[in-house]
């Protein structure tokens, strides 16, 4: 199967404070790191994949993927999104979008790229984001590379630091996923979330693990 020429970046910069610190994507769920889960879910859907993270990239060496540091420090997820945009544009100047996914969402749907790409082609909106249970997930979205100069300018003026701000600025469209038997965008923030992720992995997803 030929993969679509989509660029995807895993935003793996979460500090995991509520989990006691460290790299949240390297926490284990059902014997695999969250990052392993994410890669297993997203890699079959895209042609180009990278990890957005600061610090020593060697801790991700086993994944054999490009590791992108933030171009501008201390700006949270938006800095990772800008780095993702620059990477996609440098890799292929003709690229139009980059997909970002959160580094704490182990159960991403297998039709994520297909459905977001279709919506992007049919909608006049510039950002196409995933949604579930009526909640939009702005870090799980297709971002237009044409917006990169505008985003960089806003961040330099200390504006638009929240990812959700750009849903309004750039006019977003959301695509809804069913949350039964589980939310495909379930994210791990707390020890309780880790326990719930274990339950999902060992029950609803056991044939796919």
Image (cartoon, grey):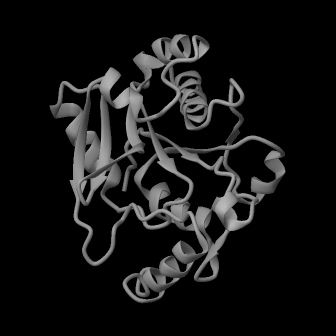
Residue shown at the point (30%, 37%) measured from the top left:
128
Q: Quadrant of residue 182?
A: bottom left
Q: Is residue 38 above or below residue 121?
A: below
Residue 113 image point, x, y percent: 34, 48
Tell me the quarter of the image containing the N terminus. bottom left
Which quadrant of the view contains residue 127?
top left
Residue 74 falls left or right of residue 92:
right
Left or right of residue 47, residue 122 in this image: left
Query: 106 or 90, which lies in front?
Result: 106
Residue at the extreme front: 18
Instruction: State whether residue 96 is above or below residue 183.
Output: above
At 58% from the left edge and 17% from the top edge, which residue is drawn?
158
**Mark count:** 0
Q: Nearer the viewer, residue 102 or 91?
A: 102
Q: Position of residue 165 (x, y in %)?
A: 40, 29
For image coordinates 52% across by 61% down, the residue present is 38
Q: Would you place residue 146 above or below residue 99 in this image? A: above
Residue 107 position by quadrant: bottom left
Measuring 64% from the left and 60% from the top, which residue is drawn there? 25
- The percent coordinates of residue 195 (x first, y second) are 54, 81
- Horizontal arrangement in the rendering, residue 181 relative to residue 163 (left or right): left
| Horizontal and vertical percent position of residue 36 | 60, 66
């Amino acid at each position: 199967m030929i993969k679509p020429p989509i660029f995807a970046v895993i935003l793996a910069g979460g500090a995991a404070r509520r989990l006691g610190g460290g790299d949240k994507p390297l926490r284990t769920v059902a014997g695999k790191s969250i990052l392993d889960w994410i890669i297993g879910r997203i890699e079959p859907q895209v042609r180009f994949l990278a990890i957005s993270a600061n610090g020593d990239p060697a801790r991700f060496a086993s994944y054999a993927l490009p590791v992108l540091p933030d171009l501008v420090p201390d700006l949270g997820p938006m800095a990772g999104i800008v780095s993702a945009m620059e990477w996609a544009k440098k890799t292929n100047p003709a690229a139009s979008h980059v997909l970002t996914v959160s580094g704490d969402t182990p159960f991403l749907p297998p039709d994520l790229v297909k459905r977001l790409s279709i919506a992007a082609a049919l909608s006049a909106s510039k950002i196409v984001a995933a949604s579930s249970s009526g909640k939009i997930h702005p870090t799980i979205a297709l971002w237009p590379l044409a917006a990169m100069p505008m985003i960089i300018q806003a961040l330099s003026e200390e504006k638009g630091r929240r990812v959700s701000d750009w849903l309004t600025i750039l006019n977003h469209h959301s695509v809804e996923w069913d949350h039964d038997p589980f939310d495909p965008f379930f994210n791990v923030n707390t020890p309780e979330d880790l326990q719930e992720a274990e339950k999902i992995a060992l029950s609803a997803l056991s044939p796919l693990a």
